[in-house]
Amino acid sequence: MTNSFEVKLGQGGFGSVYKGALSNGSLVAVKILSESKGNGDDFINEVASVGRTSHVNIVGLVGFCFEGHHRALIYELMPNGSLEKFIYDQTFFSDNQLGWKKLHGIAIGIARGLEYLHSGCNTRILHFDIKPHNILLDQDFSPKISDFGLAKLSTEKRSMISMSQMRGTPGYIAPELFSWSFGRVSHKADVYSYGMMILEMVGGRKNIDVGVDHTSEIYFPHWIYKKVKLDEELGLHPNMSDEENTMVRKMIIVGLWCIQTNPLRRPTITEALEMLEGDLKALEILPKPYFSSPLRSACSSYTE
């Protein structure tokens, strides 16, 4: 299928991904899981969760392979790769690959995918690792949520779930996953991760950036909150139209609501979607989000 693993698409803590083709000519991405990756829970999670889904904004699982210690997952191929490689590249606007309208549409598509996972399936699926690296883009730059290795399934659509250990990627982990003193773990953990992600989409940088010139700009959510609160020029990118400025402000306000420390203050993903698609004037400026996520590395993650 992969022609002896000829074309490597990517590498991560989970293993490697290779380009492949089915006998009918359909292109696929073959994810070969590392043998050292736990006891196979991530593999079971992936098959059990994605295998239950069918949504335009969820990556399609074509099949899987389980032979001895070897485990592989076969997905539909996303020709534009992950969102991560675009939003942290300061040239992506000048290259006309993405623009604010497309980026706003990507944020909406991801929210629709999460809404489906949270309330559209017979089994509620909490992803627990929403981040730009796990958002894949098809040929039209439509987003698809991928990598369900840390997902948690619940046959009952209860609001709270039990967790034995923290899971996720530093920088996107909701505070209640660090300590129950912030609240109980629920679907709002995915909402928090989503909020951190769309703020990075707006800023074109990691939310915590120790390389900036001014200390006040190190934690992007606090810096951009002041701009929005005072109704100042965002100063993110030059030559933005009024329509683009409106889209960006909506993304910022929604992102700030989603990263509220108290999960009860965060919107559901359905409410966040309605805010993104609604009128900017109807959006309330929220209290400042005080919680800062820890520094993270691109490959670091916590798993159960």
Image (cartoon, rainbow, N blue to C red):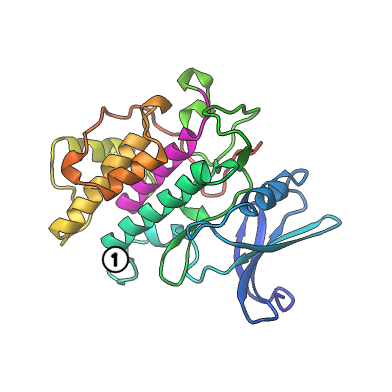
Question: Quick one: SS at disc 1?
Answer: loop
Question: Measured from the top left, where is residue 208 in percent x and y?
Answer: 38, 41
The part of the image, by quadrant, that contains residue 12 is bottom right
Residue at the top extreme?
181
The part of the image, by quadrant, that contains residue 275 is top left
Vertical order, 135 against 6 (above or below):
above
Quadrant containing the N terminus in the rendered view: bottom right
Q: Which residue is mark 1?
A: 93
Q: Residues within 10 Å of mark 1 (few under 14, many from 20)?
A: some
Question: Measured from the top left, where is residue 224 in percent x and y?
Answer: 25, 41
The part of the image, by quadrant, that contains residue 142 is bottom left
Q: Is residue 203 left or right of residue 206?
A: left
Who is closer to the viewer here, 259 or 52?
52
Query: What amino acid type is highlighted by mark number 1?
Result: Phe
Residue 171 visible:
no
Report the magenta residues as a range. Answer: 184-204
Q: Is residue 265 magenta?
A: no
Count of marks, rendered view:
1
